[in-house]
Image: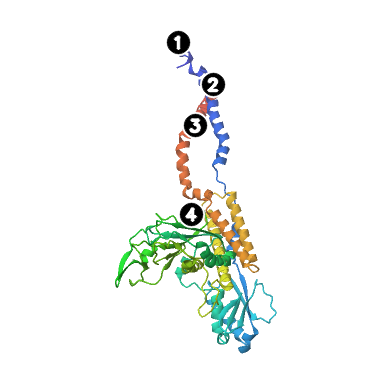
Amino acid sequence: MNSVAFSSSGLKDPRKISFERDWVRRAVLASYWVVIILAFPFWWHLTSIERLALPTSQVRTQVQNNIVFPIAVHFDASISHHNPTVVSQVDTLLRDSATNEYERWKGISLHLHDIDDEVTSKSPEPYTVVLGEQTSITHSRQLRVNKTDAQSATRLSSLLSDLIVPPESSASHSQRVVQYSNHYRLAFTLLNENATPRRFVETWDVQNALAEFVFPLLSKLSVLHNFTVESQVQYHAPLAFEPKRFSIGDTEISGLTQEDLSVFINSAEWTLSSSVSNDPVLHFVLFVPSKTHAPLKIIDGEGHPTSQSSFLLPQWGGIFILNDEFDSHSLHLSHDDLKPVFHNFATQLAALLGVPPVPPGLSMGKSPLPSDWQLDALLRRRALQNVQGTQDTLHSIVKLVDQIDNMPVGQVVRDDVLDALTSLHEAYRTAAASPAIALQLSSKALSMASRAFFNPGMLALLYFPAEHKYAVYTPLFASISVPLVVALIREFMAWRRGSRDEGRQRG
């Protein structure tokens, strides 16, 4: 319909309406595209993932390195006097052991020589082997051996290997020891199963018992850990199961089978932690059974009651069952009453922290505390574990970032990785001069590496792959972009058509 027809019908020509003019329509369409083009950089910046470069080459270099503790053992002249070749024989046997048991001797650089030799050692304090009346550890880092052991290179090498790199007795040993931490909380709890007459303890002399048995051990272990000690008394701590009844002659007892020991702790009803903290907690429970279940004995695998009154839960703590009878006037446990209990708690604490046992046939003297040989071996083992854990964690971070393209790596993560590498390098450097400082640095390196690995910014997109992003954005942008693209194509075609018409009219 031309303009004459629109005039005769009384209608306006759409081409003459202002908002239907070509340039207005195209300007409106262009404004949409201008807004999209200008907004695109902002959208890209706001939705892009920060992915900083990690020091991959440094991580791979540090993973290939290992911490080394040089150890010097000096043999007194009295040892080699009876057997001049004993030092060389012991050295050969220990080197063979290191070759055959590489994992056990990993990180150890051992040097043996006579005490009169002028040797420059990097070891912080050398160990000495001297002749004595009996084979024992009676002095700081000194091993006394009798004449029989002094003449046997096999016996000497066995003693030194068990002292320097104590073997783990079984797989359960490593599962029993708690994971290393700079700080532990020790919670000592007196649990009354039921506050009934004759089976009820109201107070206990815990301070003196701790001072005699626990605090000296904590002071000895202070080079490895810091400790916070707390105690409490609870008056109602029911068991989550009913112990089995056994008859022994005319006496009936309640028994705890090996299966019962694993579920002895009633976490649903026992409140064993009295404070809130992120530090790992080791629990030591003195359990007073009710009159119904007393005496409460531990049953062996053959179904017979044992004389054992305590047991240990791996990486959790220890329990001591108090089966002594009480009268109505005995509501207090004195220091003497608690001696066997806290002596047992101190032994369980040392086992949980990984203190190695004394080698068979070796006397420790009267001191019940760990020797410097045991503490040094524990310190080296913990440092090696921390270094290995740091290396594995850093390697996992680099491998994970390489495998997942949209894994974010922020400045915090990168700084933690760099701090971990720095601490790890310093641990390598200081291991020869001060194993204690090396342990602290390795612990810091492991903490930084773990914090980087578990950073919330990295974990967020582990479960949000690129396919999920497309699924979110496609419904949103498809409904907007399709009409705009179609309109742009139509306007482009209309413009070309108009250009051809104008060319024909001029021709």
**Do the numbered discs 1 and 4 sit on residues whose CB atoms are within 8 Å?**
no
Label 4 vs 2, first from the N-terminus: 4
Q: Circle 3 sits on which residue? A: 484
Label 1 vs 4, first from the N-terminus: 1
Residue at disc 1, secondary structure? helix
Q: Nearer the viewer, mark 3 or mark 1?
A: 3
Residue at disc 4, secondary structure? loop
Residue at disc 3, secondary structure? helix
Q: Circle 4 sits on which residue? A: 274
- 416 and 26: which one is in front? 416
Separation of residues labelled 3 and 2 (CA atoms): 31 Å
The three-letter amino acid code for the residue at tag 4 is: Ser
Q: State the residue at coordinates (40%, 71%).
A: 308
Q: Which numbered marker is on residue 366?
A: none
> Taking 324 as reference, is 62 left or right?
right
Tell me, what colour scheme is on the image? rainbow
Image quadrant containing the C terminus? top right
Looking at the rendering, which quadrant does residue 64 occupy?
A: bottom right
- 324 and 439: which one is in front? 324
Looking at the rendering, which quadrant does residue 449 occupy?
A: bottom right
Separation of residues labelled 3 and 1 (CA atoms): 36 Å
Q: State the residue at coordinates (43%, 56%).
A: 234
Q: Circle 1 sits on which residue? A: 8
The three-letter amino acid code for the residue at tag 1 is: Ser
The three-letter amino acid code for the residue at tag 2 is: Gln
Q: Nearer the viewer, mark 4 or mark 2?
A: 4
Residue at disc 2, secondary structure? helix
Separation of residues labelled 2 and 1 (CA atoms): 26 Å
**Do the numbered discs 2 and 1 sit on residues whose CB atoms are within 8 Å?**
no
Label 3 vs 1, first from the N-terminus: 1
Separation of residues labelled 4 and 2 (CA atoms): 96 Å
The three-letter amino acid code for the residue at tag 3 is: Leu
